[in-house]
Image: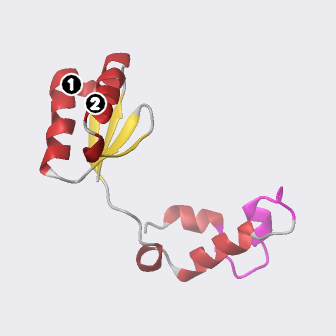
Amino acid sequence: MLLVVTYSRGARTSLRNVCRSHDAATVRQFGRAALLADTEFGAFLALRLREKHGGDVQIQRTQPLNEYESVPEPVREAAAAYEAREQPSTPYTKFAAGTDHPDPAAMQDREL
């Protein structure tokens, strides 16, 4: 998919118009940003916006996250356990202390 992010009012208006006019090429719209289909037409629409608005439009190619392939099992298990915790107000750092769950500082230093 192509992530298109806009940084000006004019670029946002153009992005909104593109998404409304080309619904088949729009995967999802978020207001200031949109995901366009990873097709030549999606690229055409994104590049057209950048030609019109210059640096007010940023384009990134994205790929979906396959959590079972990209995320280590301890991290997946920690996320599930943390969401199932008894006290919703407990911060993760306190929740993970004294357990086998990954340390948040260590996770911040490791790339997927």
Residue ID at (25%, 45%): 25
Height in image: 81 above or below 111? below
Magenta includes 65?
A: no
Residue in the foreground of this view, choosing between 20 and 62:
20
| Amino acid type, label 1 | Gly
Q: Residue furthest top?
A: 10
Q: Is residue 99 left or right of residue 22?
A: right
> What's the distance in space between the residues labelled 2 and 1, CA to CA?
6 Å
Q: Where is residue 110 in the image (x, y as percent from the top left)?
A: 48, 67
- C-beta proximity under 8 Å, tags 2 and 1: yes
Locate the C terminus and report the quarter of the image it occupies.
Answer: bottom left
Residue 35: x and y in percent read 34, 46
Residue 90 in which image quadrant = bottom right
Q: Residue 13 appears at what percent x and percent y?
A: 34, 21
The residues colored magenta run 87-103
The residue identified by callout 1 is 54
Between residues 36 and 62, which one lies in front from this camera angle? 36
Q: Mark 2 points at which residue?
A: 57
| Element class at badge 2 | strand
